[in-house]
Amino acid sequence: MFKKFLKKKYLIPLAVGATALFLFAFFGPPDLYSLTSSPEFCASCHVMEYQHDAWLKTGLHRSVKCVDCHLPNDNFPNHMLWKGLDGTKDVVFFFGRMFSDSLTISGHGSKTLQDNCTRCHGEMVSRITVEDRTCWSCHRRVNHKFPMTGYLQ
């Protein structure tokens, strides 16, 4: 079945459709990229409200957008690829009601977070060993969990 899609009669329309979708996303709706990169957009799904409140009220990295930590930022094509993949997955899981109330990060998400932490805090991280642990294993307040009950009040 997959070999059928590799034939030109399927590949060309698929490439044209993907290009059209890409152009629409960048040049179609005004400010679509910046809108979908905002923390308010991420918090628009009710399952992310707690994480958004923790990010907003603890003060840690408050000036950093969600996509700065949770998407690869090593280069723009890689960033856009994962923005599209993760965004599509999030929409399908949210509207398909295929999520649990207890959110956990994926293996790829953990690697992306670690890479972004070490990229932003490179000078500090260069003095310690981070290969065998994650940044948030020591910096627990960065993981969007409040350290004490009643912290939101």
Image: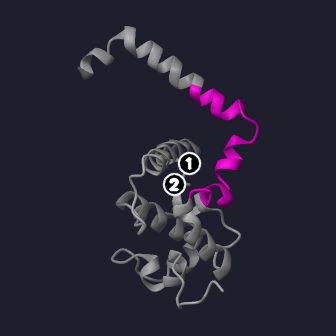
The residue most toward the top is: 9
Q: Position of residue 44 (x, y in %)?
A: 62, 57
Can see residue 59?
A: no
Count neighbours of disc 1 (C-alpha within 10 A) and say few if under 14, some if 14 to 19, many if 20 or more: few
Q: Position of residue 63 (x, y in %)?
A: 71, 69
Identity of the amino acid at label 2? Pro
Q: Position of residue 132 (x, y in %)?
A: 33, 77
Q: Which residue is identified by label 1?
A: 75
Q: 52 and 97: which one is in front? A: 97
Total numbered labels: 2
| Contact flag, marks 1 and 2 (Cβ < 8 Å) | yes
Residue 27 falls in image quadrant: top right
Q: Is residue 19 above or below residue 8?
A: below
Q: 17 and 133: which one is in front? A: 17
Can see residue 151?
A: yes
The reply to whether the magenta stretch includes residue 24 is yes
Q: Which mark is residue 72?
A: 2
